[in-house]
Image: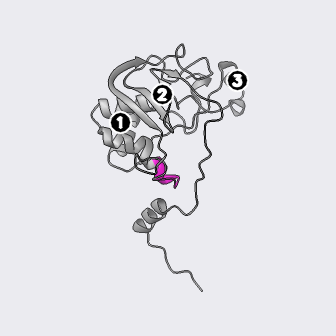
């Protein structure tokens, strides 16, 4: 394995790990598909070639996460499209305590909308991705499921693979503390004991 693929947690050599994780996503043992996208050029990664402690950790993931998730989860039949939406959008908004402002298409919500083509395929490549790096951890993977459009507050920001971003259009979204979605789940699993006096 090259320095390119060093991340936390590390890639597991056990070939049963991907299926195990996908099944955990399907049966709600895991609730979110996300990426800790932190990509570095080959030259930056190679700084730690002779000293492991100097390798910057992280890989690309944000751009390809949804297509890979669709391919491995939905296209393979492990979970359905509704579960895909929950895993990639709704549950994340709930965990960050911004649901239903985000993660829902409803009156008063501010969801970014992805128009998804479940049949269209694409081949992931460092030559065509939008990451500012010279490799791709998913290099050569063919995925069914491609975003056709992404709308942010009513404006098209991605169209047929082309990113059309308007500088300064983003909004800060506060993530309030004391998330009922998380704490209510914890309380169900382990009732909070009375404090000792």
Q: Does residue 23 show up? A: no
Q: Residues within 10 Å of mark 3 (few under 14, many from 20)?
A: some
Numbered disc in front, either 1 or 2: 2
Mark 3 secondary-structure assignment: helix
Residue position for label 1: 19
Q: Nearer the viewer, residue 7 or 71?
A: 71
The part of the image, by quadrant, that contains residue 14 is: top left
Q: Does residue 107 show up? A: yes
The segment highlighted magenta reads 92-99
Magenta span includes 93: yes
Q: Is residue 129 above or below residue 101?
A: above
Mark 2 secondary-structure assignment: loop
Q: Nearer the viewer, residue 27 or 62?
A: 62
Picture residue at 44% right of the left edge, 72% below the top = 191
Q: Which mark is residue 85?
A: none
The percent coordinates of residue 103 (x first, y second) are 44, 47
Lateral position of residue 51 relative to residue 142, left or right = right
Picture residue at 62% right of the left edge, 28% below the top = 39
Residue position for label 2: 64
Chain-order first, disc 3 or disc 2: 3
């Amino acid at each position: 394995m090259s320095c390119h693929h060093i991340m936390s947690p590390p890639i597991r050599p056990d070939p049963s790990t991907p299926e195990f994780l996908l099944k955990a996503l399907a049966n709600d043992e895991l609730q979110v598909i996300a990426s800790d996208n932190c990509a570095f050029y080959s030259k930056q990664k190679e700084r730690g070639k002779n000293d492991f402690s100097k390798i910057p950790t992280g890989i690309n993931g944000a751009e390809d996460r949804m297509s890979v998730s669709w391919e491995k989860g939905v296209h393979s039949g492990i979970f359905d499209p509704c579960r895909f939406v929950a895993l990639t959008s709704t549950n994340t908004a709930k965990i960050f305590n911004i649901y239903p402002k985000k993660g829902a298409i409803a009156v008063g919500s501010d969801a970014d909308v992805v128009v998804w083509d479940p049949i269209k395929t694409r081949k992931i490549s460092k030559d065509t991705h939008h990451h500012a790096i010279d490799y791709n951890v998913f290099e050569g993977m063919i995925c069914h499921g491609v975003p056709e459009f992404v709308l942010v507050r009513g404006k098209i920001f991605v169209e047929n693979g082309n990113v059309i971003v308007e500088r300064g259009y983003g909004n800060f979204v506060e993530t309030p503390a004391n998330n009922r979605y998380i704490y209510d789940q914890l309380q169900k699993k382990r009732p909070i004991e009375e404090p000792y006096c």
